[in-house]
Image: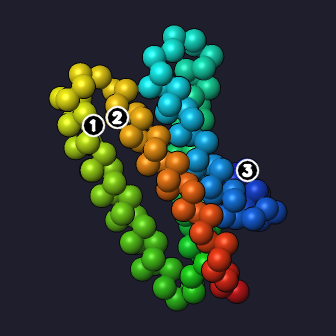
Amino acid sequence: DVCSSDLVALDRLAPHLVAAIALGVPSIGLLILASGTTSWWLLAGSVAVIGLSMGAELDIATYLVMRWFHPGIYSSVYGLIAGGTALAGVSGSMLLSLTLALSGGFDLFLAICAAAMAAGAASFLLLARHPMVN
């Protein structure tokens, strides 16, 4: 989806900063969900931000792989990212089961996911040190 707003931002702004913000802000949404609030507008906003981030992550990943790696190894690098994403999904499911058994609720799982998402988003800031492939 070439016309999506994240690609426009990636073309015009520092891509590593766009990635860090777009994939980091949803950690706040996860913390709001974990807070136990009953405010419908906070809950709706949190879910919307998380959903927008999930939609943007594939666009951002494909863009960054193409900009930071040689096109000849695009499929290998993107395959590693896709495999890592799949493993993270499986690991998250197992972690959810464990935290539900330990705490009886979703709050612990949401807090762990928020911390992991914030750390992952912050790691995009390290891309600034590496030259971009032309």
| Residue 66 locus on image (x, y percent) | 60, 76
Q: Position of residue 18 (x, y in %)?
A: 69, 56
Residue occupying image coordinates x 62% and y 64%: 125
Q: Residue furthest right?
A: 12
Q: Which amino acid lies under the numbered mark 3 shown in the image of this protein?
A: Ser
**SS state under label 1:** helix
Q: Earlier in the sequence, mark 3 or mark 2?
A: 3
Label 3 with label 1: CB-CB less than 8 Å: no
Q: Is residue 57 above or below residue 99?
A: below
**Percent x, y for residue 100?**
23, 29
Inspect the image, locate mark 2, and give the three-letter code of the amino acid beneath it. Phe
Identify which residue, 2 or 126, lies in the foreground.
126
Residue beneath label 2, please? 109
- Dot in front, 3 or 1: 1
Q: Is residue 85 above or below residue 53?
A: below
Quadrant that contains the C terminus: bottom right
Amino acid on which the number 1 mark rests in the picture: Leu
Residue assigned mark 1:
96
Colour option used: rainbow
For the residues labelled 2 and 1, the Cα–Cα distance comes to 6 Å
Please, what secondary structure does the residue beneath circle 3 have? helix
The residue singled out by tag 3 in the image is 5
Residue 15 found in image quarter: bottom right
